[in-house]
Image: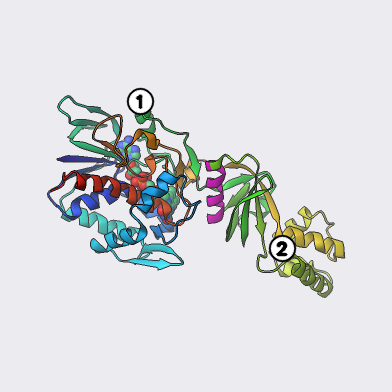
C-alpha cells in the first residue's frame, strides 16, 4: 500500500509519525512545496509550540464537528501518543508545550524519528493536479515529477502566514475544480483595525478584561494583554476576538477593555478622588497609566485637559477606565493571521475524513473548514484529524 501525504506541515507530519510508529515497512511519502518539512512548527507559540490545551469550551472551535473530531482523540490520548514516541510535554496554566519549550527541538526530533523509519520525503515539489486512474491508483502531479499512490491524504493547510515569496499552487482552487465545496476563506486570529485614532498609543501594552460586544450583547470576554498598533489592536485576546467576529459575521462589533478589572467603578471613583487631591500639577491618571494612555483616557472621557478634575469628571474618567471602547473596522489580512477560517466542507467527507466524491482521497488539518482559538487548539485539531484517518486505516487492516 503506497500512501502519499501531500503537505508535510503539522498534520502531515503527525500522520506520518502515526503510520511509521508501529510498522516501519509502511510505504509513506511526504511531499511538500517548501525546501524543508514542518516549517510551520517553528513559528508556533512564538517558537515554543503550544500544542494542546487542557480545556475545550464552546468557543474553542468553529463547529461541533471540528470539536467532535478533537474529542475523539482528546488531550490525554495525544499526550500518551507523544510519550509513546519518546516526546515529553510540559503544562503551564492548562497549556501544553514540548518539555524543551522549543518548536525547533521538537521538529528536529520528529525529522530524526521519521528518517530512522525510512520515510520518503520529497521537498520543493509543488502539487498542482491529481487524477484517479482506471486501475484504482491515484496519480499526483507536481512541478517536477509525478507519483502513483493507493491512497492520498491532503494536508496542505490554509492561507495564513504564507510568505509572499512562496509561489505554491492554491489547493483550494484545485479542490473546487474537483467538485469540493469550499466555504469562504477568511483570515482568523489576526490583529484588528478599529475606527478610533490610536496612533499615539502604538506599541503600548495594557492588561485588562477584554470584552467583545455585538450591538449591546456581550459575546466573549478574556483577561489578557492588548498591544496597540498604529491603526488597531493586537494580542492573544484580540486574535481570539477577531476569529469570533469573522466566524459569526458580527456586523456591530465593539471591543471594550476594563483596564482595572480588580476594582469596582465606585471604588475607582474613590481612589481617583484621593489621587486628584494629592496631585497639584500632574494629572491623577499618570500615577496609574502611561502618560499617552492617560491622555487618551481623558480625551475620550470628554473632559478638558485639566490637571485637576471635578467630581463629575472623575466619574467620567472612572467609567472610561472600566469601559475603554473600540469599534471594529476590519481584520488584518492573511499575512498576519494564524489560522484560516473556512475550507473544505465536512459534507464532502465521511466520518473518516475520506472524500465522498473520490475514493481513497482524504483531508486533514487546516485545509478543512476548521479553526480553533489561540491556546494550542489548532495543533490539537491537526493531530486529531490525522488520527481519524490513521484509525480508519488500522480498522481497514491496511497497515499490517
Ligand atoms: C505565527 C503562527 C503561530 C501559530 N501558533 C500556534 C500555536 O502555538 N498553537 C496552535 O495550536 N496553532 C498555532 N498556529 C496554527 C497552526 O500552525 C496551524 O493550524 C497548523 O500548522 C495547521 O497544520 P496543517 O498541517 O493543516 O497546515 P500547515 O502546517 O500549514 O502545513 C501545510 C503544508 O502543506 C504544504 N503545501 C501547501 N500547498 C502545497 C502544494 N500545492 N504542494 C505541496 N505542498 C503544499 C505547505 O508547504 C505546508 O508545509 C500558529 C500559526 C501561525 C501562522
Query: Which dot, 2 or 1, sits closer to the camera?
Result: 1
Tell me: residue 317, above or below residue 60. below
* Of the pair 125 and 152, the residue shown nearer to us: 152
x and y, in percent, of residue 13 in the image: 28, 49
Question: Is there CB contact under 8 Å for labels 2 and 1?
Answer: no
Q: Is residue 239 magenta?
A: yes
Total numbered circles: 2
- The circle drawn on residue 290 is none
Determine if the C-beta at disc 2 is less than 8 A from ligand 1.
no
Question: Would you say residue 293 is visible in this rendering?
Answer: yes
Mark 2, other Cα within 10 Å: few <14 / some 14–19 / many ≥20 = some
Question: Would you say residue 206 is visible in this rendering?
Answer: no
Q: Which residue is mark 1?
A: 177
The residue under the point 34% across, 52% down is 72
x and y, in percent, of residue 360 in the image: 23, 35
Q: Is residue 272 left or right of residue 184?
A: right
Q: Is residue 75 magenta?
A: no
Q: Is residue 96 left or right of residue 315?
A: left
Magenta stretch?
Answer: 235-247
Amino acid at each position: 500500500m503506497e500512501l502519499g501525504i501531500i503537505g508535510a506541515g503539522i498534520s502531515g507530519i503527525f500522520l506520518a509519525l502515526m503510520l511509521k510508529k508501529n510498522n516501519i515497512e509502511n510505504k509513506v511519502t511526504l511531499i511538500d512545496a517548501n525546501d524543508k518539512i514542518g516549517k510551520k512548527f517553528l513559528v508556533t507559540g512564538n517558537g515554543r509550540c503550544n500544542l494542546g490545551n487542557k480545556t475545550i469550551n464552546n468557543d474553542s472551535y468553529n463547529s461541533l464537528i471540528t470539536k467532535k473530531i478533537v474529542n475523539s482523540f482528546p488531550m490525554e490520548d495525544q499526550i500518551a501518543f507523544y510519550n509513546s514516541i519518546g516526546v515529553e510535554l510540559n503544562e503551564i496554566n492548562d497549556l501544553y508545550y514540548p518539555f524543551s519549550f522549543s518548536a525547533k527541538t521538537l521538529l528536529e526530533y520528529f525529522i530524526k524519528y521519521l528518517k530512522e523509519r525510512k520515510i520518503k520525503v520529497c521537498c520543493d515539489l509543488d502539487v498542482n493536479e491529481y487524477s484517479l486512474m482506471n486501475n484504482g491508483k491515484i496519480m499526483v502531479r507536481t512541478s517536477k515529477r509525478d507519483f502513483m499512490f493507493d491512497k492520498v491524504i491532503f494536508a496542505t493547510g490554509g492561507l495564513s502566514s504564507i510568505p509572499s515569496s512562496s509561489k505554491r499552487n492554491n489547493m483550494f482552487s484545485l479542490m473546487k475544480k474537483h467538485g469540493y465545496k469550499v466555504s469562504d476563506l477568511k483570515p482568523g486570529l489576526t490583529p484588528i483595525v478599529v475606527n478610533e485614532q490610536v496612533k499615539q498609543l502604538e506599541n503600548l501594552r495594557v492588561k485588562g478584561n477584554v470584552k467583545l460586544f455585538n450591538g449591546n450583547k456581550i459575546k466573549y470576554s478574556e483577561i489578557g494583554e492588548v498591544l496597540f498598533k498604529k491603526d488597531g489592536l493586537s494580542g492573544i485576546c484580540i486574535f481570539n476576538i477577531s476569529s469570533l467576529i469573522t466566524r459569526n459575521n458580527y456586523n456591530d462589533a465593539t471591543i471594550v477593555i476594563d483596564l482595572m478589572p480588580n476594582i469596582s467603578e465606585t471604588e475607582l471613583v474613590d481612589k481617583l478622588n484621593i489621587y486628584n487631591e494629592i496631585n497639584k500639577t500632574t494629572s491623577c491618571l499618570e500615577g496609574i497609566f502611561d502618560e499617552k494612555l492617560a491622555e487618551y483616557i481623558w480625551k475620550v472621557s470628554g473632559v478638558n485637559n485639566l490637571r485637576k478634575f471635578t467630581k463629575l469628571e472623575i466619574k467620567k474618567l472612572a467609567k472610561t477606565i472600566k469601559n475603554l471602547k473600540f469599534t471594529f473596522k476590519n481584520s488584518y489580512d492573511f499575512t498576519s493571521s494564524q489560522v484560516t477560517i473556512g475550507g473544505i466542507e465536512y459534507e464532502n467527507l465521511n466520518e473518516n475524513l475520506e472524500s465522498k466524491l473520490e475514493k481513497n482521497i482524504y483531508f486533514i488539518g487546516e485545509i478543512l473548514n476548521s479553526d480553533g482559538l489561540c491556546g494550542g487548539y489548532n495543533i490539537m485539531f491537526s493531530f486529531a484529524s490525522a488520527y481519524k484517518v490513521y484509525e480508519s486505516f488500522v480498522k481497514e487492516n491496511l497497515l499490517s
